[in-house]
Amino acid sequence: MNSIPAKIAMLHYTCPPVVGGVEAVMAAHARLFAKRGYKVRIIAGRGPVPENNLAAITTIIEPLIDSKNEILLGFNAALDRGEVPAGFDDYVETLYQRLQKLLEGYAVCIVHNALTLHKNLPLTAALIRLAESDQLKLIGWCHDLAWANPLYAEVLYPGYPWELLKISTSNITYVAISEQVKSQILRHFRPPLKPEAIPVVPNGVDFAEFLGISAETSAIADAAGIEAARLENALLLLLPARITRRKNIELGIKVVAALKKLNQNSRLIVTGPPGPHNPKNDVYLRELIALRQEFEVENEVIFLMEKWADETGKPRTLSDQNISELYRYADALFFPSTQEGFGIPILEAGLIRLPIFCTDLEPFRQIAGDLPHYFRADDAPSAIARLIVEQLSQNRYYQLRRIVIERNTWDSIFNRQIEPLI
C-alpha cells in the first residue's frame, strides 16, 4: 500500500446503522479499509450518521440518493408504469453534479447495488455518466440484479433508463457476491462481459466479533502468533493447563512435531505458567523449552507465559474470560495428562462442541463416555498425530469451520480479494 493513505468512497441508498445485509457488508468493508490505513467516505441517502470509533471513516447523508425520498417516489410511480417522468433528466443532472463534489479527490467508489437495482434509476444514470467521464473508477458491488429477479419483471421495460441496470460500461468493474450472481451478470449484461472480467468476492463474517472475543484476548492472540496462525488456516490445539509434569506437555510437543512431518500446519497453545507450589515446575519448563528446540517446533508450540508478559517480563494472569475465548479460537482440545482427579477442560470443550483428544483416564470417561478421541500416554506421537488428522478429516463441523476461516472471514477475503481490486 502507498505511504499516503488511499481514499475510498462507498455508496448505497442507506447506510449503517440501518439494518440490512448490504448495509452490514458495507460497514464491514469500511472497517477493513480503515484498519489498513485507508481514508473511507460512506455516501448514503438515509441513515443516522453512525458513531465510528475509527476516525478514518466519515459518513455523508445525501437525501437525493435515498431510495424513498419524496421526489423519487413520485418518479418511481411513473417508471413502474413504463413512463419516464418529466424532470427525470433534471434529477439526473442534479445528482451528477452533487456526486462530482462528494467524490472529488477520490479515485475509486464502491457502489453497492445502485448500478443493478431499480430503486433509484436517476442515481444509476448519474453514476454511469460519472464513470463514462473517466473522473474515477467505479466498482459495482452486485448483491442483487433487478433484471434477473422475476419479482421485478412487471416494473422493468426495454430502453432507457431501465436497461442501464444491465449495461456493461467502461471504467466500471462489476463484482459478484456469488457464482450465481456472476452467472446472472453474464446472462443479462450487454454488451456481454467476459467471465474473467467479473470477480466473485463473497460476503464474510468477522471472526472475533461473531465469536465474542474481547479486545484483550485478541491482543493476546496477536502477541502469541495465534491470530497469524489462524489466518494461515493452521490447526490450533488448545492445552489449557499450568505447567506441571502430570500434564504431560512433552507429549504435546512430540505430537506437534509429528504433525509437522505429516505436512500439517499446527499450533499447540499452552495457556498456563508453571504451577506455583512446586519449585520443580520451573525445571520442567526449562526441559520443555529445550525439547521444543530439539524437535524444531519453536514456532508451533506456544507458551502464552512467554508471549503475554508485563514490562518486567513477568507473565500476566489470564482471566477466565481470556481462557474461555481462547477455546473459541481453538480447533480442538488436546489434553494429554497422565493423571487427573476430574477434568474441567473436557466439560468446557464439550460445551462449545470442540473436538477432544485426550488420554484415556477414568475421570474423563466418567464425564464424556466414548465421545472424546482417546489415546494412551505411552502411544507413539506419530500415531496420535494420525488420529488427530484422521478424525478431524471426518468431522463435518470442523471441516466447515476450516472452509469458513479460509474463505469467508473478512480479513482473509480482504487480503485475498478486495484490496487487489483497489
Image: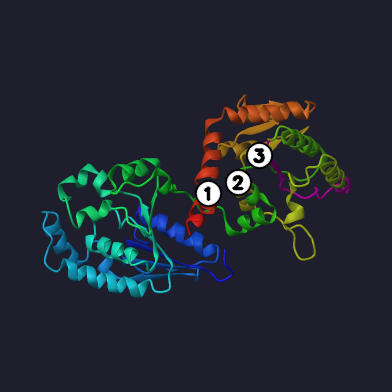
Q: Residue at x 75, y 59 (%)?
A: 309
Q: State the image quarter where residue 109 is shown.
A: bottom left
Please determine whether, in this image, residue 51 is positioned above or below residue 391: below
Left or right of 5 on screen, residue 356: right
Residue labelled with disc 3: 345
Please determine whether, in this image, residue 231 is positioned above or below residue 139: above
Residue 1 position within the rendered picture, expressed as x and y whole percent measured from the top left: 57, 63
Q: Which residues are magenta?
A: 264-283
Give the CA distance from mark 1 to mark 2: 9 Å
Most extreme residue toward the top is: 370
Q: Nearer the viewer, residue 13 or 1?
A: 1
Residue labelled with disc 2: 329
Give the CA distance from mark 3 to mark 1: 19 Å
Task: Please tell me which of labels 2 and 3 falls first in the chain.
Answer: 2
Disc 2 residue type (three-letter): Tyr
Left or right of 81 on screen, residue 53: right
Give the CA distance from mark 2 to mark 3: 15 Å
Answer whether labels 1 and 2 touch (C-beta < 8 Å): yes
Regarding residue 376, the answer to whether it shows in the image is yes
> Residue 274: within the magenta?
yes
Q: State the image quarter where residue 395 is shown.
A: top right
Task: Please tell me which of labels 1 and 2 falls first in the chain.
Answer: 1
Q: Secondary structure at mark 1?
A: loop
Q: Mark 2 or mark 3, which is nearer to you?
A: 2
Left or right of 222 on screen, residue 180: left
Disc 1 residue type (three-letter): Leu
Q: Residue at x 21, y 44 (%)?
A: 151
Residue labelled with disc 1: 211
Q: Residue at x 80, y 48 (%)?
A: 274
